[in-house]
Image (cartoon, coloured by chain):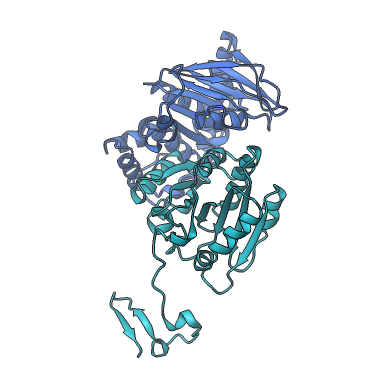
Amino acid sequence: MRMVIVAGTPGSGKTAVLIHALRSLNERNIKSSVVKIDCLYTDDDQKFSKIGVPTKIGLSMDMCPDHYAIYNLEDMISWAEENESDLLVVETAGLCHRCAPFTMNSLGVCVIDATSGPNTPLKVGPFLSTSDIAVITKGDMISQAEREIFRERILEVNPNCKIIEANGLSGQGCIELAEEMLKSEEVSLDEEKLRHSAPLAVCTLCVGETKVNKKYHRGILRRIDGFQSYQGE
Amino acid sequence: MIDNITILGGYDKNGEKEPVNKVTVNKGEIFGVVGPTGSGKSSLIGDIEQLAQEDTFSKRKILVNGKEPTYDDRTNPRKKMVAQLSQNMNFLADMSVGDFLNLHAKCRGASQVCVNKVINLANTLTGEPIKDDHDLTILSGGQSRALMVADVAIISDSPIVLIDEIENAGIRKHDALEVLAGHGKIVMVVTHDPVLALMTDKRIVMKSGGMRQVVSTTPKEKALSQKLNKIDEIMLSLRDQVRNGEVIGDMNTIKLDL
């Protein structure tokens, strides 16, 4: 199965851009299946089904949506195979921006909102720095100067990515994204690896502790002064 | 060097071939794009921005110096040939004007000397002076637009400038267009405003998503445009006077010599 993984900041227009791109693939008789991973709620499945693309929703609830997406990839691929799709598109709602759900052989697409400020490309981490394609949205709302600064900042973080400037409302740039999606390669899950390790998160909070005082916490704890220690047996 | 761009017609919203199948715009020329709301003006500008190669909804093709641009010319973000200015654009960066222009100049590999040039040029386009220690985000609409025009003219060295409706901006529109065309750029301006439309060299008339016809501006229209520009100047100066708390007394000082 060929796999496209789409990540991005909340509200950046991942779904809007994808819908235009998938419509363009439909016109070329390329069949895709979409899995939308969110945390608590989404109605994006209705939007995708309007353009006739089979859609499955995964709500990660209290789990990290990226982690949840990663270990469910196998099920998603078999579902897309059942649909006889050419392409599996996974759209994830990463939250802390420290994970990148892209695997080595998938096509990694990062959608990033130009109105989020010129420093955002420096802040968002591996889902931008390890992506193949950076889609910049909402560029029509900021000055030409800021667009140019934004582009340059993205290239500082990821010099090899391809930048597509897209408009989720008008669909501008989305055909170019569809062209790139066509170039995605077959993924065989047995040997497939993540491009970037998921962040360290093995403390008491991860397993449900709600008390805030330091004395209740065990595991690998990093202090604000930079020191890190292991508390526990 | 870009001397001209050519737009090869595609299809309108009804899937019909566009009546205008070829338009060439030369360096230093100002082209207008006119037509009712929803007639496809912004899509035409979008096609030029992307240097479309029959790969957008309209299936138009854009040639640069009569040739197809290379894949790298189209997609390398450092080679972007097109700069845009529109009414919807805002400055969102939380910085001073000086720091911001410095950062932009650095990104474009331009000299820091540009910064003062941009501010001085912007101040010729708007009534309220901009200073380099002003916060970018608190500039007025007129100041922002003036700064964007000056920045595009001097720092963004893209040879093609697309302007989408800057009519209500509170700047000297005539001068703004002249500044851009004067820097050897290919300028296309989407507008409903006769002051702007009549100062262009030619204008493309849009209807239902297609280019209907190309109208050359007549000498009469050019002369009218000069007069409209005077009215514009009067509006701007009255605007400044009202702003400064002055009482507008003598209407005789305003001569509308039409």
Taking the image as shown, residue A5 lies to the left or right of residue B153, namely right
Residue A208, above or below A61: below
Residue A25: image quadrant is top right
Q: How many marks?
A: 0
Say which of A161 and B98 sits in front: A161
The outermost residue toward the top is B219
The residue positioned 61% from the left and 14% from the top of the image is: B215
Question: Residue A198 placed where, x, y %?
Answer: 42, 67
Question: Residue B218 placed where, x, y %?
Answer: 58, 10
Say which of B90 and B107 sits in front: B107
Q: Quadrant of the N terminus of chain B?
A: top left
Q: Quadrant of the C terminus of chain B?
A: top right
Residue B240 seen by the camera: yes
Residue B57: image quadrant is top right
Question: Residue B43 placed where, x, y %?
Answer: 60, 32
Residue A96, above or below B222: below
- Chain coloured blue: B
What shade does chain A have?
cyan
Residue A124 seen by the camera: no
